[in-house]
Image (spheres, rainbow, N blue to C red):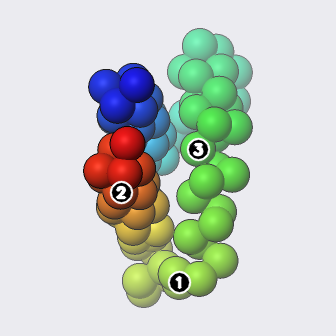
Amino acid sequence: MKYLIVQLANLYTLIVFVYCIFSWFPIPRDGVMSDIYRFLQKICDPYLNLFRRFIPSIGGAVDISPVVAILVLQLLVSLVVGIL
């Protein structure tokens, strides 16, 4: 059970990381890359928006909410696995 929780958290962390990398590059409006980006957006934005409400962008351009979101996710996983 612990292994599954850790692996799912690691997978979601990787998905958030890939989503952030995608956001650095222009994505065409249609095509496979656009479909992948929209899929990642649907998976990541609900979680990231929890942090974006409270953490403003630095200089209006640098969003550090994914870093905080990943740290919180990993902390919560460590606590849950520690309890189990």
Vertical side of 58 occupied by 83: above or below: above
Give SS at disc 2. Answer: helix
Vertical side of 77 occupied by 58: above or below: below
- Residue furthest to the top in view is 32
How much space separates mark 1 and mark 3, taking CA atoms? Answer: 18 Å
Residue type of the residue flagged with mark 3:
Cys
Q: Which residue is mark 3?
A: 44
* Residue at 34% over, 31% down: 2
Give SS at disc 1. Answer: loop
Q: Is residue 41 left or right of residue 23?
A: right
* Residue at 53% over, 83% down: 56
**Which mark is first along the chain, 2 or 1?**
1
Residue contact between numbered discs 1 and 2, judged by CB atoms under 8 Å: no
The tag on residue 79 is 2
| Mark in the foreground, 1 or 3 | 3
**Which mark is first along the chain, 3 or 1?**
3
Residue 55 seen anywhere in this rendered image of the structure: yes
What crowding class fits label 2: few (fewer than 14 Cα within 10 Å), some (14-19), or many (20 or more)? Answer: few
How much space separates mark 1 and mark 2, taking CA atoms? Answer: 27 Å
Q: Is residue 84 left or right of residue 53?
A: left
Residue type of the residue flagged with mark 1:
Pro
How much space separates mark 3 and mark 2, taking CA atoms? Answer: 22 Å
Residue 10 at x, y percent in the picture: 34, 34
Identify the image quadrant of the C terminus: top left
Q: Which residue is mark 1?
A: 56
Identify the image quadrant of the N terminus: top left
Residue 81 at x, y percent in the picture: 34, 44
Give 35 or 40, whichever is nearer the viewer.
40
